[in-house]
Image (cartoon, grey):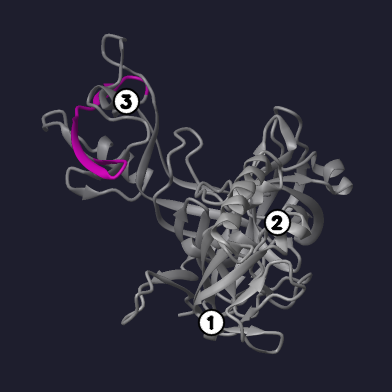
Amino acid sequence: MTPKKRQILGALLAFVLVLGFFAPPAGSYLYLPEDQMLSVGDPLDLFLNLPPLVLKSINVYVQGGEKLIDFKGGPLKERSYRLGAETAPVPVKPGRIELQLKLFNVIPLKRISVSVIPNLVVIPGGHSIGVLLRTDGVMVVGFLPILNENNIPVFPARDAGIAVGDIIVEINGTKVVSDDQVKELIASWKPADQGMVFKIRRGNEYCERVVYPKYCRDTGSYRIGLFIRDNAGGVGTLTFFEPASRKFGALGHMITDAETNQALQIKEGKILAASVQEIHKAKRGLPGEKVGIFLENSDLGNIEKNDNCGIYGTVYQALKNPLYPQPLPVAYSNQVRTGQAQILTVLDGQEIKQFSIEIERVMPGRHDGKNMIIRITDRSLLERTGGIVQGMSGSPIIQNGKIVGAITHVFVNDPGRGYGVFIENMLYEAGVLQREHSLGSNDPGFLYFNTK
């Protein structure tokens, strides 16, 4: 091609691209992730929602990792392939593959780095679980006035600088483990003593406050005017169980205190089997909920972590899902598509059922549990629950035979819709997926799964 023809072609292409960016299909190119993940055996097929004629004009050049690829039953002979081809190359070994997209074999469009990891499969959840947590220290959730000897309301702890959301970790050098212990320490305070030294954690920082308890005429004891809490509990849904490591993930979002909206710092916790007894139907502006009971002597596992995208820990024994007796592969964020999908959840007792949904939008790059917008399309589920209800958080989302994520939030004014989190983000937080640097390599980071 002569230089003049290239200039004309480049100008024409620029014009077409400018116009094309205003069309919805062009968004698939703009938001095509430059860093992607695949499992061994997944087709190296980049998702671009463009007309077939345009796709066939785009060549993918393999500029690194070509020895990891199999193409049509044999090694990749050419270092490039067309996006519109019927068969895409398949990675056969873990590693990193570097790709360059070019239009008409000439004009560079985008570079993409693909991390290929060993096959990872998990047992999908859907089980109704009870969650019991004990916090590290006790959390301040409110204030209560104390009437002094002059019948005047006072707030000793608040006046000393303690705030709602603070975590009390020590009192006078004694480590705090429960709200009952705090009450006993304050009740044993003597008026002749100095003020009580409270060590508190506020966010990630520690500080001390000196509090002077006041005698309460109503109770006949010394008090400091605080509401505190050392535990939390509720009903949610298990998302996955990874058989090799026995790690689990649930809820899809962090557990926070209802009054303070602060994240709960876990000292210890466990999950139990739960039975759904009743459904309070969701209405516009009024979230619904599952009403469940914890089953006695049904401990399933311990909770080790309360993070942005869920709670995580280790189960005591293998968990089973009667709808999916065999583990399912996981789909990474770049493999999730808009369109039909299914969720697994419990509406009665402990019976897991599957219901249809629509993934309306995919939003990669977020770490707040809001990677997808989903809509409930199953009429039976809508009639029973009105949409997404409390206790449904963590219900796994399955698309094309792979687990892609979990339900996390409901749109209060439109309970038939809500958010979902990528399973990829949950697997990172659970420690199933990890990122490590490869020794003796220029590879900035290689993704693998941990089954220790």
Q: Tell me whether the residue at label 1 lies in contact with that at label 3, contact meaning CB atoms closer than 8 angstroms.
A: no
| Horizontal side, residue 331 vs residue 192: left or right | right
Residue 220: assigned label? 3
Point out residue 150 in the picture as x, y percentages from the top left corner.
27, 9
Q: Report the amino acid beneath label 3.
A: Gly
Q: Nearest the camera: 305 or 444?
A: 444
SS for callout 1:
helix
Q: Which residue corresponds to mark 2?
A: 337
Query: Does the image show residue 425?
Result: no
Point out residue 235 in the picture as x, y percentages from the top left corner.
63, 50
| Horizontal side, residue 260 vs residue 413: left or right | left
SS for callout 2:
loop
Point out residue 437 in the picture as x, y percentages from the top left corner.
35, 73
Disc 1: CA contacts within 10 A as few (<14), some (14-19) or many (>=20): many
| Mark 3 or 2, nearer chain start | 3
Q: Nearest the camera: 255 or 132?
A: 255
SS for callout 3:
loop
Point out residue 279 in the picture as x, y percentages from the top left corner.
77, 43
Q: Is residue 243 above or below residue 31?
A: below
Q: Identify the residue shown where x is 67% and y is 52%.
A: 293
Query: Does the image show residue 144?
Result: yes
Provide the residue span drawn in magenta.
200-218
Q: Tell me whether the residue at label 3 lies in contact with that at label 2, contact meaning CB atoms closer than 8 angstroms.
A: no
Disc 3: CA contacts within 10 A as few (<14), some (14-19) or many (>=20): few
Q: Identify the residue shown where x is 61% and y is 50%.
A: 8
C-alpha gap between disc 3 and disc 2? 64 Å
Q: Nearest the camera: 117 or 215?
A: 117
| Mark 2 or 1, nearer chain start | 1
| Mark 1 or 3, nearer chain start | 1
